[in-house]
Structures are given as C-alpha cells and as structure tokens.
Image (cartoon, rainbow, N blue to C red):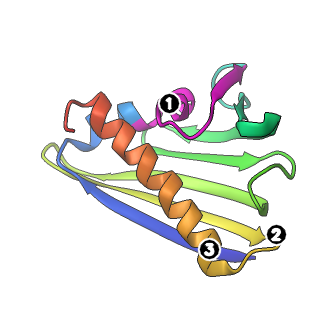
Amino acid sequence: MLQFSYSENVEASALQTWRAMRDFAAIGRAGLAERVEMIGDGVGSCRHLHMPGGKVLIERLEARDESTMTLTYAMTEPGPMPLDHYVANLQVNGDEHACQVVFTADYEPRGIPEEKANRMLSNVYRALVNTARADLGLS
C-alpha cells in the first residue's frame, strides 16, 4: 500500500474552509466529472461520479468529524481511476485567519507508475481546494 500527502494553505479561517470542504457533493462543482449523483446523506452516503465514456466512479463517505475538521472517503470498487484500495482523508488545520488543507491517501496503483498516480491525485485535490476557494469568494 502506498501513501500520498498533499497540502495547500488557504487565506480563510479554518472553520470557513472546513464548511466549504466538508460538503461531500462539492466535487460536482470542481469539474472533475460530467455529472455527480449523490445517494444518501451524511456518513455512509455515496457519490457516483459519471465520467466521459459512461464510466462511473463510486466513493463512499466513511467518516466526518466536525470537532477535528476531518473526513474520510473510499472508492467502493475498482472504477475508471487506476487505483485500488483507495482511501483518502481530508483535514483542515488553522485558526481564524488562515488554514492548511491536508489530504492523505492510501492506495495501490493499477497499471500506472506511482509518480503518475500521485500527479493525478494532486490534480484532484488541487481542484477541490480551488472549488472551496471559489465558494469562499477567494478566487
């Protein structure tokens, strides 16, 4: 199992940033899928990311902790993303002036080198942080 970490600083309070990042459906505004369908609400909900060519990536919200500003999600089955056993964690740390958004992921690459998998994850996480910035009026 490989591990990857990605972080960015955001010039907004940790609480404001968390409120933007905690929305499991926000990936729909990040432009990472043609369409996002949510099944359920809260922990245990699944998001179905409909990709070009009719492929679907399914991720389940495994945990969300408001007090520590963390959430965990996992791919439920192999999909169009060339990763197996993918589990990601998001945490927001900081104060009322600025914060850091940290993503960590455990995964096994499927048919691609580790460096390519890490670039792909960086692009996804960057898009999610940029979506939060837009939601906060920072971009």
> Quadrant location of residue 130?
top left
Residue receiving disc 3: 116
Q: Quadrant of the C terminus?
A: top left
Instruction: Give the amino acid at mark 3.
Output: Lys
* Mark 3 or mark 1, whichever is nearer to me: 3
Q: Nearer the viewer, mark 2 or mark 1?
A: 2
Residue positioned 56% across, 38% down in the render? 64
Label 2 CA crowd tier, 10 Å (few <14, some 14–19, many 20+): some
**Residue at the location (63% across, 41% down)?**
63
Q: Amino acid at mark 2?
A: Arg
Pick whichever, 53 or 66, lies toward us.
Answer: 53
Is 120 magenta? The answer is: no
- The residue that mark 2 highlights is 110
According to the picture, the residue beneath numbered tag 1 turns out to be 26
Quarter in which the N terminus is drawn: bottom right
- Extent of the magenta region: 21-39
Gap between marks 3 and 2, in whole Å? 11 Å
Q: Earlier in the sequence, mark 3 or mark 2?
A: 2
The residue lying toward the viewer, choosing from 131 and 106, is 131
Left or right, 24 with reference to 84: left
Mark 1: few/some/many CA within 10 Å (<14, 14-19, 20+): some
Give the mark nearest the N terminus, 3 or 1: 1
Considering depth in this image, is 15 or 31 the residue closer to the camera? 31
Percent across and percent down for residue 17 are 31, 39
Residue 58 in which image quadrant: top right
Picture coordinates of residue 89, whole percent (x, y): 57, 54
